[in-house]
Image (tube, rainbow, N blue to C red):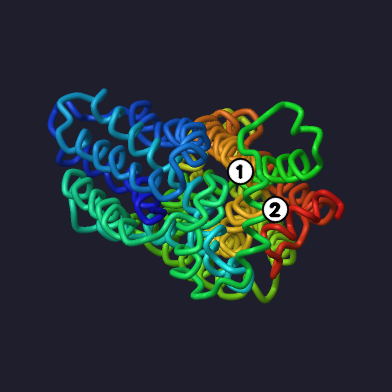
Amino acid sequence: GPLSFGFVLGYSSPAIPSLRRTGPEFLQLSDDEASWFGSLVTLGAALGGVLGGWLVDKAGRKLTLMLCTVPFVGGFTLVIGAQNIWMLYGGRLLTGLASGVTSLVVPVYIAEISYPEIRGLLGSCVQLMVVSGILGAYVAGLGLNWCWLAVLGCVPPFFMLLLMCFMPETPRFLLIKHKKQEARAAVRFLWGIDEEQEAEEKECSEVDQGFHLARLKNPSVYKPFLIGVSLMAFQQFSGINAMMFYAETIFEQANFKDSSLASVIVGVLQVVFTAIAALVMDRAGRKILLLLSGAIMALSCMLFGIYFKISLPSPNNSSHPDLLTSLNSESAGANSGLPWLAVLSMGFFLMGFSLGWGPIPWLLMSEIFPLMVKGLASGVCVLTSWIMAFLVTKEFSSLMGVLTPYGTFWLFSAFCVLGVIFTLLFVPETKGKTLEQIEAHFQGR
């Protein structure tokens, strides 16, 4: 599932230049249309968060995941057969919708089927597969045009549908629906034991599912809810999308001739460090990784700001929206080490993000919500994440114009610092605890 949605996120990077080179006359994208082609996915995903939050509690975790295949394949089919730009937009919106639902359901499914000792490792695999999907799209884009790339995008969702047929529904969901026999069979299939079953059965069968406003007074609902939404907001305001957005330009400044190869390098960096995070997640714990990650990102954004401050020509250029491309070659030439400062800052930033703020907000979202509001609360978190992603991606150029590039990256740095302070004060450590123990922690039991 996350591999499919990573591929959707990475698709626009190689597809836009390919459409301009080899696409038919009626699919030639202007700069503005290309920007919409890239960012419509985030709007679709925000809708997917709302839909997924409702579906995951009504249809169940397994069926919702299987249903995601339809908009994934349908969206790519629309792109392949596009007769006008609106069909391209429709395809991106549909694949975005599927990505939004997947980004909600997969973490929930994984958290509910794993036992505490490996939940961090398996939960981090969500982000690992997302960045692998992005890297896959970049690498495939080196050899395939936009149309064949979309055909390739239909493969991971097909395997998800096929393989989920052999997977059980989560025991917790079955117990909420009072299907005790099926829940027992699922536990035997997943863990090969029945020992935790009795206590869990009692807790889950007492859960009255569905959302009532009175529930918001319950600390086990409003505390994790506020933590989840805040983590998603800080994740997007760290500047990750801005970094990805301008990765190619940054590499061009450092005299990398092949900027699409630079994207692949960025992708490899993310995969390697997300894999490291997954391996240490259950040893180090979530909180320490968030703090370390936030500190690295704050420092990187600060250095990035310094790079722009030194290398930008003159103040009268500062309202130019394409500032990154207008960095004059003389200043880059005169300070030949400077573009490398940018490349190193970006490398450190991606390393920091992949170690903590990339995977952990999604992992915590799947761990901290009580069963009774899991669908709705996760839906609001996903909605927050994708709307913020849309705003940051769409408005980044305007922000660069108003605040200047160095001001923008120093603002991102400030948000990273705020994220660290927030984590220190409010985020609990969930390492090694069962989902029921985490819920009890918020109730003060």
- Identity of the residue drawn at 47% across and 30% down: 47
Foreground label between 1 and 2 = 1
Can residue 409 be seen here? The reply is: no
User: Going by the image, does 379 lie left or right of 92?
Assistant: right
- Residue 249: percent from the left, percent from the top? 44, 49
Dot 1 crowding, Cα within 10 Å, few <14, some 14–19, many 20+: many
Residue 214 seen in the current view: yes
Q: Is residue 268 above or below residue 78?
A: below
Q: Which mark is residue 334?
A: none
Q: In which quadrant will I find the C terminus? A: bottom right
- Residue 150, horizontal then vertical, whole percent: 22, 46
Q: Quadrant of residue 400?
A: top right
User: Mark 2 belongs to which amino acid?
Assistant: Met
Which circle marks residue 302 in the picture? 2
Residue 403 position (above or below residue 121): above
Pointer 1: what residue?
A: 374
- The part of the image, by quadrant, that contains residue 280 is bottom right
**Horizontal relation, residue 22 to residue 280: left or right:** left
Q: Nearer the viewer, residue 390 or 313?
A: 390
Three-letter amino acid code at disc 1?
Lys
Q: Position of residue 62 (x, y in %)?
A: 41, 50
